[in-house]
Amino acid sequence: MSVTTINILLFGIGNVGSTLLKQIEESRDFIAKQNGIVFNFPIIANSTVVLFQNADQQQAWETDFKRSSIPYQFQEILDFLKNTQLENLIAVDVTASDVMLGRYLPLVQHGCHLVAANKKPNTVDLNFYSLLRSELVVQRKQFLYETNVGAGLPIIQTLRNLYQAGERITRIQGVFSGSLSYMFNRFSVEPFPFSQILADAERNGYTEPDSRDDLSGTDVARKLLILARELQEPLELDDISIEPIFGETLTRLLHETDYRSNKQALNRYLEERKQQLDPDEVLRFVGVLDLEKRRFEVKLTAVKRLSALGQLRGTDNLIEIYTESYGRNPLVVQGAGAGKEVTARGVLSDLLQIAQLVKQREVVRISEVSG
């Protein structure tokens, strides 16, 4: 089997980025043998410095990054691509940065396919959303972002397949946040204060870099928006109602004061919510995308302990997709919805999907030249 080299521009070397590099190195021989694909990393960057590599030095990337990375301007990366004339490029965004928004179009125009764990480029205004997709068509490039919703779970692709097959989707609902699932699954049955469980979630890498993004409900709202747009719903983030977990006053307080030193303030409010539950109820943070009633919301709600949502454990997500064909029995996708390992594996799956397409095009091109 011929081997195709895929050149990756990696933006972000935190939990997910570093785990992705590790997984690719561990699976390098298998991927080459099974798929005829080798991943090369000519560019590895964080927000301030970049490592340019003319040859693959992936095994020693951490040492090389500390020793040889340099401060950079984004234009220098584009110049590097132009000067080196690298082919088979995929830019991978595993940051949570707004800065990356301005980089997607230039990267596509310089020959890059896109893979993103970062949800923000898919949840900004519709003008950018549409412009990016138009440019992808013009440049014949792919953009995959399965990990935007459900980490490594096949939610976006499942929904896309249903929609493209003409299925009428009426409602999507469930627990969309692995971090909030973990926190409220534990909080509902354990005696520990919420702030302690939150600290555990942060330490395990389940939350966003700033866990206020999780607690605000905005992260779940972004996931609903991404799914709505997959169904060609022209929604903006403001169209999704977010009921703050802690009420308006406490939420505002956490944003105005030193959040890290005030997490204990969360305990009393949630303990009161817990005491109000019936014996057969637990708390879950639920998102609803009701396309028939035009109801789009995320909120903390009480559910029956023995219901599907009530029986969730760990970081599990559970998403129910209601359609005309499935009737009253939804299609259910359930599994781990947080964690650097499952997210990195989901990114790797997207990478392989694009790499296989690139390889197929390469085979066709060689056949045409030979013919």
Image: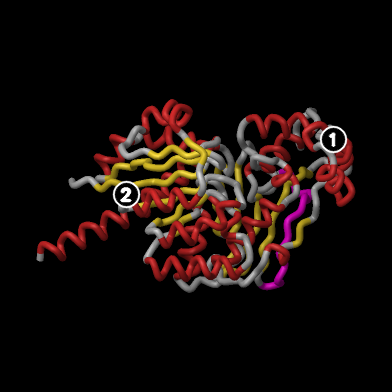
The percent position of residue 214, horizontal first and vertical second, equals: 70, 45
Whether residue 143 sits left or right of residue 304 in the image: it is left
Q: Residue furthest left?
A: 371
The percent position of residue 282, horizontal first and vertical second, equals: 77, 43
The C terminus, quarter of image: bottom left
The percent position of residue 118, horizontal first and vertical second, equals: 56, 50
First in sequence, mark 1 or 2: give its number.
Answer: 2
Q: Nearer the viewer, residue 312 or 263?
A: 263
Q: Which of marks 1 and 2 is in front?
A: 2
Tags 1 and 2 in contact by the CB under 8 Å rule?
Answer: no
Q: Residue 280 carries which label?
A: none
Q: Give the range drawn in magenta.
A: 292-305
Confirm whether the magenta stretch covers residue 34: no
SS type, badge 2: helix
**Residue picked out by circle 2:** 84
What residue is shown at x 48% (from left), y 28% (from top)? 66
Q: Main secondary structure of the magenta part?
A: strand
In the image, is residue 48 above or below residue 363? above
The percent position of residue 17, horizontal first and vertical second, equals: 49, 39
**Residue picked out by circle 1:** 267
Can residue 204 be seen in the rendering of this structure?
yes
Determine which quarter of the picture holds residue 277.
Answer: top right
Amino acid beneath label 2: Thr
Confirm whether the magenta stretch covers residue 301: yes
Determine which quarter of the picture holds residue 279.
Answer: top right
**Mark 2 crowd level (few <14, some 14–19, many ≥20, 10 Å Cα):** few
* Coloration of the structure image: secondary structure
